Amino acid sequence: MTKDKHVIIIGSGLGGLTSGYILAKNGYRVTVLEQNAQLGGCLQTFTRDGVKFETGMHYIGSMDEGQILNRFFRYFNLLNAMQFSRLDTEGYDIISIAGQHFPFANGSENFVETLSRFFPKERANLQNYCNYLSKITDYSVFYSGKEQSQNNFLKEPAFVNSASEFISSVTSDPLLKNVLSGSLPLYAGVEDKTPLYIHALIHDFYNKSAFRIVGGSDIITESLVKSIRSMGGEVHARQKVVKINCDDKKAISVSVNEDNNEIAADYIISSLHPCRTLELLDTHLIRKSYRSRINSLENTISSFTIYIRFKDNAMPYQNYNLFCSSEKDVWKNAGNYSPEKFPVGLLYMHSCSEPNQKYAQSAILISYMDFDEVAKWQGSQIGRRGSEYEEFKQEKAEILLDLLEQYVSGTRSAIAKYYTSTPLTYFDYTGTEKGSMYGILTDCKNFLNTKVFSRTKIPNLLFTGQNTNIHGIIGVMIGAVLTAGELTNTQDIIRQIYEE
Ligand SMILES: Cc1cc2nc3c(=O)[nH]c(=O)nc-3n(C[C@H](O)[C@H](O)[C@H](O)COP(=O)(O)OP(=O)(O)OC[C@H]3O[C@@H](n4cnc5c(N)ncnc54)[C@H](O)[C@@H]3O)c2cc1C
């Protein structure tokens, strides 16, 4: 019945593909258009000298039977296509502060028990911390599978309070505050702005169980594309949408590539950053005030990344992620970043190329960086940005590798080669504003004005992807349900996810 309704989805990242999957499954005719030669957006990988590197999906959580991502992966038919490697349950994340390593262990009890060894007087506070975070996640129908009676969520403390305020209310111990905030790079949190619910959902997601994807996250792309095509949908690379065409009331088509090839649609879903989407629209249906609100929104900070290839059998595989901070207060890292401070900390993760591997083939090292530091090269061609840019990257990489060596000695001598990317790389490959890692920064003190919902001012144009709902694998998948639900029915999709 709905097969005659054509939905064009702009962008083939996780948001575009999962929205496309849900709609194809529910009878819509779906066409996904991707500007790049490689599909997947942040799920893209690249290979150098036979070693694969992931660009924007390094670890996932809640994958044990019955847990939220497991349910979503089953629904998206991803379970059979993939293998997962469990991170150390006694310390999937290690927070390194002032020369000490603090492990985050899986499960609330274990989490409290492990950190209580370092902070014996804080046991009750740690227990309260975990209990409260669990309460917040249970509040979400997606996490609990149960609809909650209250629906005035904007009054909930998790939405109006910041994560930093909450953590400060849990304990007065400054070191414990930093430890509990140690995995901030997972959401590039900003003091007094990032809402508590984002911290709660991400903590709970990884605390339940944490895994690496064996062989790389591009397997997710391949599998979703295959499924969409098998349900009659189309997915095309090298199709850059250059315009969304509207009549007096609604969107009617998109123009693609330099030849402006026009494709008609009943609905259009954009998974691009909202600023990029607005650039495609020249219509009175979008008011100036909406445009200026979206364009003035703050975005999460970007990053500088080193992709490390190790010599053969030189680096024992680390089954955990390492978060190191140079600042005394980790909340100052993203919010108060300035180029002179680089690097304010780092996130270091090995990749998993096969189950039970003994030695790492590759690793990724990420540190915050502002787009302004590379803005002068904007508009240059990828791979041909010039020697000054290459020198800039090398200088930053050497500083960052020196810092890593202080935390994990012996890394430098195990490196065969490394490659780097900057905020400009992310901007050019995904179109995210200023290379922002996780898109628009939600400010709990100004929640509604900093939030972008799926619906737009144009009735048949919707947003999906990390800028609606939350970033990350589960945030974007939930966002896809909410977006697709605008055309079908959100409760029906949730039922499908929980009953299948
Ligand atoms: C460094 C980094 C590490 C991360 N690590 C993790 C992690 O370990 N675990 C986790 O869960 N999450 C992680 N994330 C977050 C996660 O990758 C993202 O939230 C998610 O993949 C975003 O998906 P998306 O579809 O919203 O956007 P994107 O993946 O950015 O997709 C947008 C797509 O639109 C395409 N596009 C843009 N303009 C056009 C146009 N005009 N026409 C056609 N196509 C266009 C782009 O090329 C791109 O493919 C990480 C992110 C970063 C940056």
Image (cartoon, rainbow, N blue to C red):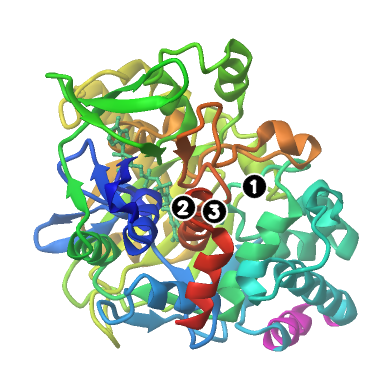
| Residue ID at (73%, 59%) | 178
Question: Of 20 and 312, which appears nearest the observer?
Answer: 20
Is 184 a magenta residue?
no
**Is residue 72 depicted above or below 442 in this figure?**
below
* Circle on res. 189: 1
Taking 392 as reference, is 191 left or right? right
Structural crowding at the residue carrying mark 3, measured as other residues with C-alpha within 10 Å and reported as few (<14), some (14–19) or many (≥20): many
Q: Earlier in the sequence, mark 1 or mark 2?
A: 1
The three-letter code of the residue at mark 2 reads Ala
Dot 1 beta carbon under 8 Å from ligand 1? no
Q: Residue 492, position in %: x, y?
A: 53, 67
* Circle on res. 482: 3
| Residue ID at (31%, 55%) | 43
Q: Residue 280, position in %: x, y?
A: 37, 21
Is 117 a magenta residue?
yes
Outermost residue toward the front in this view: 1
**Is residue 373 depicted above or below 485 in this figure?**
above
Question: Of 392 and 334, which appears nearest the observer?
Answer: 334
Say if mark 2 contacts mark 3, CB within 8 Å. yes
C-alpha span from label 2 to label 3:
6 Å
| Residue to which mark 2 is pinned | 484
Q: Quadrant of the C terminus?
A: bottom left
